[in-house]
Amino acid sequence: MNAELVWLPDGRLQVTVPGGGDAGAKGSQRIYDIVSGKVETVPAADIDLETTTWSPRAVNGDGERLTATSKGGHGTVVVTGDSGSRTVFDEKGGSQYSVGDEPSWSPDDAFILLTDSSARLLVVTPDGGKARVLAEELGNGWAITDRDLLVTGDP
């Protein structure tokens, strides 16, 4: 995945796709509001390349830890804390399907961001509700999909 991700302090997600080999090319940057679904395209002149590092936070404010595992085309994300463990994401794909190994809590601990081998950005609620496919990488850019995925507990 060639996008760089960072949670902003207000809980929005910044996605930056670096520019190509052209000198001075900044690429593109969008800011996703996970709650409202609104997307802001940042004008090229305003792209901030200094804040484009994804610093995954595997432990939330309550001490709950995120763990991602992939095996045999099956990817899961588990939250583990003092009260035990719960699966918040459970997806089966083709034999090569996997989830990224660095899921991350949003700054307010309301969402979990992860990536998968299908070049998707996924947002999951910590209660194990439905996962949202926030965006998919398509060729030279990202397509906003805003569609739900079935996860643990769905028929």
Image (tube, helix red, strand yellow):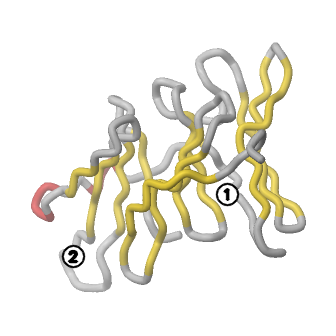
Image point 34% across, 70% down: which residue?
18
**Mark 1 vs 2: CB contact within 8 A:** no
Task: Tell me if 143 is positioned left or right of 2 in this view.
Answer: left
Image point 83% across, 60% down: which residue?
74
In the displayed structure, 71 sits above or below 122; it is below
> Which is more toward the observer, 104 or 26?
104
Residue that lies at the very extreme toward the front in this rendered image = 155
Q: Which residue matches tag 1?
A: 100
Q: Identify the amino acid type marked 2.
A: Ala
Query: Is residue 77 in view from this perspective?
Result: no
Image point 54% across, 63% down: which residue?
120
Task: Tell me if 82 is positioned left or right of 7 in this view.
Answer: right
Whole-percent x and y of residue 82?
A: 81, 14
Q: Callout 1: 10 Å neighbours few (<14), some, many (20+)? A: some
> Which is more toward the observer, 138 or 15?
138
Whole-percent x and y of residue 132?
A: 53, 49
Task: Tell me if 43 is positioned left or right of 154 in this view.
Answer: left
In the displayed structure, 64 sits above or below 99; it is above
Q: Secondary structure at mark 2?
A: loop
Return the mark for residue 25.
2
Figure quadrant of residue 26: bottom left
